[in-house]
Amino acid sequence: MDMYAENILDHFQNPRHKGTLSAATISVEEVNPLCGDKLSLDLIIENGSIKDMAFSGSGCAISQASMSMVAEELNGKSLEEAEKLSKDTIYELLGVPISPARVKCAILSYALLKKSLILLKHQS
Ligand code: FES
């Protein structure tokens, strides 16, 4: 049984920005190939900034908390700032050592974010 830090449990139980956005500028989906868990992310972009974002899907506490933390961190920020978010930022937000077996869970949110940023570039 994994031990989770309080902040992870808090984000898991009370996820920030959970849901979908019908007016999304872009929607992406990513799967953790190791477990099959899936997350979707909707972003509304205005004037080069993330006006709103929401995620849906299911998964373990780490993947859900990580996505919730990333959404809280980046909502309202510029795309430039979003580009700067690294895997290390996610590990810092989670605040606990991530075992190799859980790395894919922790960075599922990162994969989603990167996918959306790449697609946005192709759109513009
Ligand atoms: Fe599926 Fe963590 S076990 S994302």
Image (tube, rainbow, N blue to C red):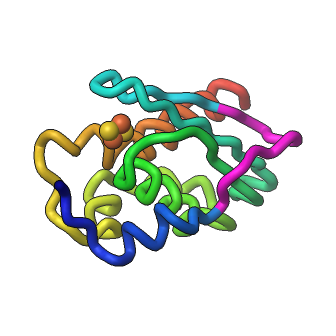
Residue furthest right as drawn = 23
Q: Is residue 96 left or right of residue 28?
A: left
Give the quarter of the image for residue 91.
Answer: bottom left
- The foreground one among 64 and 123 is 64
Q: Which residue: 73% across, 31% down?
A: 124
Examine the residues drawn in magenta and state their main secondary structure.
Answer: loop
Q: Residue 42 in the image: x percent, y percent?
A: 69, 42
Which stretch is magenta?
17-27
Residue furthest front as drawn = 1
Give the quarter of the image for residue 98.
Answer: bottom left
Q: Which residue: 39% across, 40% down?
A: 108
Q: Which residue: 42% across, 37% down?
A: 111
Say which quadrant the N terminus sits in. Answer: bottom left
Q: Name the quadrant where ligand 1 sits.
A: top left
**Relative vertical location of residue 50 with respect to residue 38 in this rendering, above or below:** below
Q: Residue 40 in the image: x percent, y percent?
A: 60, 36
The answer to if 26 sits in the magenta stretch is yes
Residue furthest bottom as drawn = 6
Q: Residue 34 in the image: x percent, y percent?
A: 28, 25
Q: Is residue 59 left or right of residue 78?
A: left
Give the quarter of the image for residue 76.
Answer: bottom right
Q: Residue 101 in the image: x percent, y percent?
A: 15, 40
- The foreground one among 61 and 121 is 61
Q: Is residue 109 left or right of residue 86?
A: right
- The foreground one among 121 and 20 is 20
| Count of marks overlaid on the render | 0
The answer to if 112 sits in the magenta stretch is no
Q: Which residue: 79% across, 55% down?
A: 47
